[in-house]
Image (spheres, helix red, strand yellow):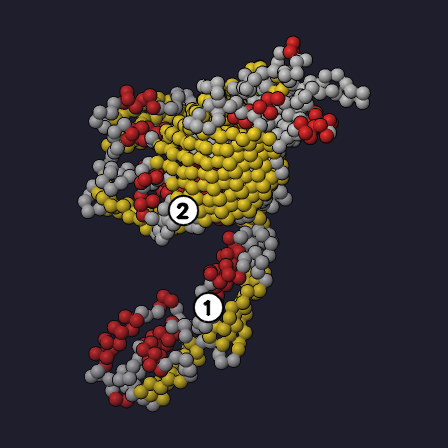
Amino acid sequence: MRLMLLASACLLPTALGVAEARSVRQHQTSGAASGNNVIQAITVSGNTRIETSTVLSYMVAQPGDSFNQDDLDRSLKSLYATGLFKDVTLHRDGNTLMVNLVENPIVNRIVFEGNHALKDEDLRKEISLRPRAVFSSQTTAADRQKILNQYAGKARFGATVTPQIIKLSHNRVDVVFKINEAQQTLIHKIVFVGNHAFSEARLAQVISSKENAWYRFFSSSDEYNPERIKYDAELLRRFYLHNGYVDFHMVDATGELSPDHKSFYVTFTIHEGDQYRIGKMDVRSNVRHVTPEMVRPKIQLFKHQIYDGTAIQHNTTDMQEWLQAQGHPFAMVRSEIARNPEKRIVDLLFDVTEGPHVYVERIDINGNTITRDNVIRRNLPMAEGDPYTPFDKKYSKLALQDLGYFSTVSVDQTQGSAPDRVNVAANVVEKPTGEFSLGGGYSTDVGVLGNASIKQHNMLGTGIDAGISGTVAYYEKQADISITDPYFLNRNLVAGADFYFIQNNYQTYQSYKESQYGMSLRLGYAYNRYLSQSFSYTLVDRQVGNFYDAAAIAKDPDLMQWAPSIYVQQSAGWSVLSQLSTSLTYDRRDRRMNPHEGYMMKVGGDFAGLGGDAKYYRVKADGAYYIPLDRIMGNHDWTVQFKGGVGYMGDWSSSGRRNIIDNFYLGGENLRGFLQGGVGPRSGHICNGLTSENKCNYLPSQGQEDLLGGRFMYTASAQVNFPLPMGDDLGIAGRYFLDAGSLASVRVKNKYTDYSRRNQSDYPYTPITGDTLTPRVSTGLGISWKSPFGLVNIDGAIPLRKEKGDRLYPLRFGFGQQF
């Protein structure tokens, strides 16, 4: 009798099932089996690697059992289920059960041919076959499908994978996966069905998937991905709710592969419904000591505005956070809506209730192998024994992500020892925090540059940030060593120190160079999430010089026109700055980098004179306000930002050295369209007649016109950030700006502006021009490109209002890490 059966996963007996069946069968047949129908022995043949005892352990039928067809069938399936055998044959020879086996070969090696989009090591991670493991055709077929799935994730749905088995000696095989990657299956067309309020072009801006275009070589948005289609459906839902379509729902979102397997057609079928506006708004409170009158001023919406689900959710969150900050940690706010389809009005009710009183029993930290537990715990917004609210979970995750030490962060909660207790687990996966970088670029201010840095953002798991960096540019050299402890003395203090060297060569538009060797000690304190203060002490050894002196001019009189003015010469030489500074910052921006909404205010001051040569004070105030244009433009990439600043410095002692490098300077980054420092007081350029060669006869030390800076400065700027066509795919964004500002009140040791004394030998007459508070105004356009080579910034500006003698610089360009 020869039995050949294919194994089926749903019919495979477990080891326990085999043992139970064997026990029951032996009990049933111990007295009933006839001697002529009993298995006296089992003979196994064909096995070379696998022990006979191992083969017998897989079988249901055993010596002493009857030749039962059901037992034999189940034994056959069990042997096939092991995956060790290519062929199994059972037959009876007298009272002996003969088991003939053909073992599956051993995999010698696994080879991938034709793959370019995916590396060999990436494919090996996905498949189950391994060298020196038992070969199985079923496993090979499953691995083939896994490889196809990987290519589908790369939008190569036309890829084919053909396994080839190469037989070797000693029952070994090489498995070769021949891969035809085919071209990427890109999205050829995106269609919207059911839209009336918004055009297809407008809805195409909302979703992340894009139609194939030649300029999307840096983007994967035109690659078909089923998960992205689901995400796009959610983006459309949010967009319609944001614009008042309360009854919107997604009917279907499908992607259809073209018959030639070269492209996809994506269709979104939607039901828009009617647009609603907000009607009545009210507050209901069941929390003790919280009245509706207390909460109503916190409603940030207004009647008859278009219903905005996102704004309502943000308003609800702000209310709840405000109540919790007012001493009601378990207060919860929910928004309820009541539709009026006839009037297309939605009435809002903010329901304030008392949530469950839950406290943190234990906090567990999991997954950290380098970062110390206390570093993680001190950044959590809660401690053991504190009230626990849903926001604690949200902000705990955000706080740990902001550290930058972990690739993934999750915060989970489990029931504690009592109904009002929870255990919180912070689960992290660490990532490398060391950094070595080499870079380069170009900046209008410093020219071609190169930089290198070594940094460690989590030194020995303590959270200490330390690094050394250096920059060499055409007009600047800089080296810096810094260290920062974000939790100094285990308290809410940020402490740090910097040691630096800076050398600036201003001689492209000034007549001197500046060198600085110094150190700075820093200390900061956060009063809460929004308000912080910092202190610093700076000690710097400075030098102003390296200009043409009297000896050089005597040898070459033509150098006189490049000689510095008397005001620069008064600052020449070495000086020591000893300065104490502080700043107070209130920051309500939604994010520190590229803010979209919110505001920031900062006031600060410097006091120089705790030793050293300089004796001055300086006060500054800056502010910024960001307004999102999402509601107007329907796009998150539109933002209006307003910035302004004012500063004043004075000298508190006549004995202090008045160094021009300490003054305020205007132009460049803080007033685009003008040269850096090109606005404000400057030494006059006087030509006292002509020589016999028709060259200017400059008075001694009266050649170069120098930018002197000033005591008082104000700036104002309005800017609109906007997206550009194809910008999302190329990483380009645009901006339009209007800058204004002025700088006045010259600050020098002595003024030589009395024309009546110009012929006195001890009076180097040097007039000062540009000392006026008349505003300078410029406007222009700029773009930012996140290129593969680094961030590229280009700003072009033209002056709308300028004064005679102001130095212009209409185009600012820079790329690389330093700009």
Amino acid under disc 2: Asn
Does 719 appear above or below 166? Answer: above
State the residue position of label 1.
Answer: 130
State the residue position of label 2.
Answer: 458
Looking at the rendered image, the quarter that the C terminus falls into is top right
Does 650 appear above or below 676? Answer: above
Q: Residues within 10 Å of mark 2 (few under 14, many from 20)?
A: many
Q: What secondary structure is marked by label 1?
A: loop
Q: How crowded is mark 1: few (under 14 residues within 10 Å), some or many (20 or more)?
A: some
Q: What secondary structure is marked by label 2?
A: strand
User: Looking at the image, which is closer to me, 290 or 655?
Assistant: 655
User: Looking at the image, which is closer to me, 678 or 578?
Assistant: 578
Quadrant position of residue 489: top left
Amino acid under disc 1: Arg
Q: Earlier in the sequence, mark 1 or mark 2?
A: 1
Looking at the rendered image, the quarter that the N terminus falls into is bottom left
| Residue that lies at the very extreme toward the top in this rendered image | 756
Residue drawn at (55%, 65%) of the image: 112
Q: Where is residue 532 in the image (x, y as percent from the top left)?
A: 37, 30
